[in-house]
Image: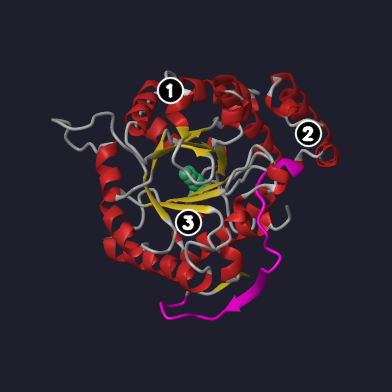
Amino acid sequence: MDFKLLLQPQRFVVALAIASLTFGSPTLAFMAGSGLTQLKPLSADFSEANHLSCALHALGNNYLDFNHLSNDNASDQSQFSAPGGQAGSRVPVIAGNWKLNPATVEEASTLLSLLASNFINHRGGIAAATPEVIVFPPFPYLERAMTLLEGTGIKVGAQNVGVESKGAFTGEVSPSMVRSLGCEYVMVGHSERRTLYGESDDTINSKIKLSLQEQGLKVILCVGETLEEYENDLLSSVVSFQIKKALQGISRDDIVDTVAIVPGTRLVIAYEPVWAIGTGKVATPEQAQIAHAVVRSTLQEMYGEDVAEKIQIQYGGSVTPDSISDLISMPDVDGALVGGASLTADGFTRIVDGAAASLSTY
Ligand code: 13P
């Protein structure tokens, strides 16, 4: 079975979707048998990874029980390459969206310090953090986050940006401002921005365009259907439409990352079904895979297969340490955008660890 089948004809995706919903696991068994699941492009040699129970450590009751990676293994860049040099190598990306939390800078500092401790003391810092890891604190905590996470390999992003670079726009924040702080990412189009603050597709499009003008800044574009849309079989058309509108006028050259060591793009898509956000109702891995295949198919239509293959697609909506492994085992699920579970250092680290551990199976 050629992966192109999944990417090219929308018909195949729809057929797979219907088959999955109708036949459930036999369809997944077919996918596995056909090699589709083998196409998860990330490979890391985690053969030396072992399970290490860590005690309470210096920064408080921050108990972790995770895969400990040896430094030799962790620092080997070859861990990022796909088995057999598959074209679509994608590093998984785990991001924590703190939303309007926590309430004070002191609490934020504690959370950041605990995270830093987890990554430096136990995960070996940047080298061992095999998935790309990003946190999105509220604006007032960004600079603190940059400072406290230095040397951990955890990147910092802004949850939102405005549509202007500078001038008389009270209360706004520009992409260049957050970039100048050292942020590598901005998040655009979260469903809470769309529904609570009336952000239109056009506004989202303007934000992405302005952000991509900033050298070194990458964009996480959030898309996803409501429950009503899902129940009316509108997932595919809604998600596809949101992507096309958000990326209107944005070219291949605008999104291909020409400076990255690992071939990639400056765009990440987060598929977040609105019905799964903050509800505790995580999408099943099969539901996520169907939606992610729609996302990739849309991206292929817009930018061609080579670019679409490089774009990381995250799942978001009630992700926990318990659900990450199954979700990320799907061929088009390249990470997670985590809300509630990113507000404790242990919860978030366990999710990162779950994503890292799943790589050892490829
Ligand atoms: P929860 O993980 O709390 O459902 O939030 C998901 C989300 O909106 C991340 O952006």
- Identify the mark nearer the N-term, 2 or 3: 2
Q: Secondary structure at mark 1?
A: loop
Q: Nearer the viewer, residue 126 or 222?
A: 126
Residue designated by label 1? 250
Magenta part, dominant SS: loop
Q: Is residue 258 above or below residue 229?
A: below
Locate residue 117, reporting x and y percent: 43, 71
What residue do we see at 61% from left, 77% from top?
53
Locate residue 238, reporting x and y percent: 55, 23
Q: Nearer the viewer, mark 1 or mark 2?
A: 1
Q: Secondary structure at mark 2?
A: helix
Magenta stretch bounds: 38-61
Asked whether residue 323 appears in the rendered view, the answer is no
Amino acid found under the numbered disc labelled 3: Ser
Q: Nearer the viewer, residue 344 or 113?
A: 113
Residue designated by label 2? 20
Answer yes or no: disc 3 within 8 Å of ligand 1: yes
The CA span between labels 1 and 3 is: 31 Å
